[in-house]
Amino acid sequence: MTQTPRPRTLKLASAALPEGNRERFLAEWAAESVAISEHEGGFAALVFRLQVLVGAPRLAFTLRSAFVPGLFDGFLVGLTLMVPALFFTVHALVAGESLLGLMYFLVVIGFAAFARGLWCAKDGLVSRRLARFGLILIFAASIGVPATNRLADTATPMSDAQFATLPGALITSLGTVIFLLSSKLGHRRVAAVHFGVLVLLAGIFVWASTSFANAVAAPTWFERAYHASIIPSSLVVAHGCIRIRRAGDALVVPKVREVTPPLDVIPHQ
Amino acid sequence: MNAPFRMTPQTRQLISYLLMDSEGDHYGFEILKATGLKPGTLYPTLARFEEAGWITGTWERIDPETARRPARRYYRLTADGVAAGISVEAEAAAITKIAGSAPLTP
């Protein structure tokens, strides 16, 4: 190792790492930065340092969670899905809307099953039964929440929102139904899975857009946060849908479909 | 061989690249340039490989004053890493064969 100039971006990136790894990675990155600067110029080295900075939290998590497959994904899913769903549940119960609280609780259970089915299989493939059970619960709740808001005349930021989230919920539910029924369609099931997931994605897009508009139009910060908290969850569910599309291909071609692309290898050393 | 982590396309790409010169030493810039991976993907993957015992990392033995550059960290495949890489490539080849013979759409 050597006492070379260590750019602040790299120092900042290494500060995110566990203490025992900081010096090692800082020295390694500094050496790489010098090599890139010599071969590709100062701008490429700057881009490298910024990419290292952006990737540092992921590296930090990897170093802290070695040999725990899927922990990073599971952590993100837990954070983005469970927190807003639990928040809505508690909020509804505190507001005295017990039926609405029950509906949101179904969402919590549904998301938990869906996330578990998607992310916790070690080889990355979907545990379809669990994911579908989760989707059924989310489907039931996506009908139940707006229905409860309408029939029980509830008073929550959702029911008082400027734009109705019902269209997004209905399109999402339609996509879910197509997806759930796809296994009954014989040789057309792969096409049905893909179509169902596309409708599901469209529904999530409408739902998230409406929530964003509601958040912008909301009169208080609490209500803005209430509506905006759905948006990260939508992104996670959309990511899950893309995984299901890949599993749809796996119904025809066993396991994963991706093939390592040919490498454009430069002469080494 | 079962990997103790998920085999993503990037993971497969990295192990395949290292396997092309399984007895050689590789460093970050060279791997980034050859594979097109981003640093945010490369370093966590190298860390996982190292934890799994697929590669070993050593510091280059140079005098930085004489070489006028800092020492690099080099990575080399271990025997376990070579076995894992061969297994991964065999799996990829099998999938390619199946994908080539089976229709992807009904």
Image: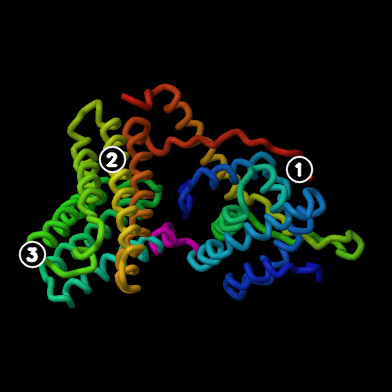
Q: Which residues are magenta?
A: A66-75
Disc 1 crowd rating (10 Å Cα; few below 14, some 14-19, many 20+) is few
Identify which residue is drawn at 42% across, 58% down. Answer: A73
Q: Nearer the viewer, mark 1 or mark 3?
A: 3
Q: Which residue is mark 1?
A: A268
Q: Which residue is mark 2?
A: A199
Q: Which residue is mark 3?
A: A152
On the same chain, marks 1 and 3? The answer is yes
Q: Which percent across, then down, holds residue A26?
A: 69, 67
Taking the view exactly as shown, the residue that stands out farthest to the bottom is A94
Q: CA distance from mark 2 to mark 1?
A: 48 Å
Marks 2,1: beta carbons within 8 A: no
- Quarter of the image with the N terminus of chain A is bottom right
Identify whether A43 is placed above or below A84: above
Identify whether B88 is placed above or below B62: above
The amino acid pointed to by label 2 is Val
Is disc 2 placed on a helix, strand or loop?
Answer: helix
Residue A226 belongs to magenta span:
no
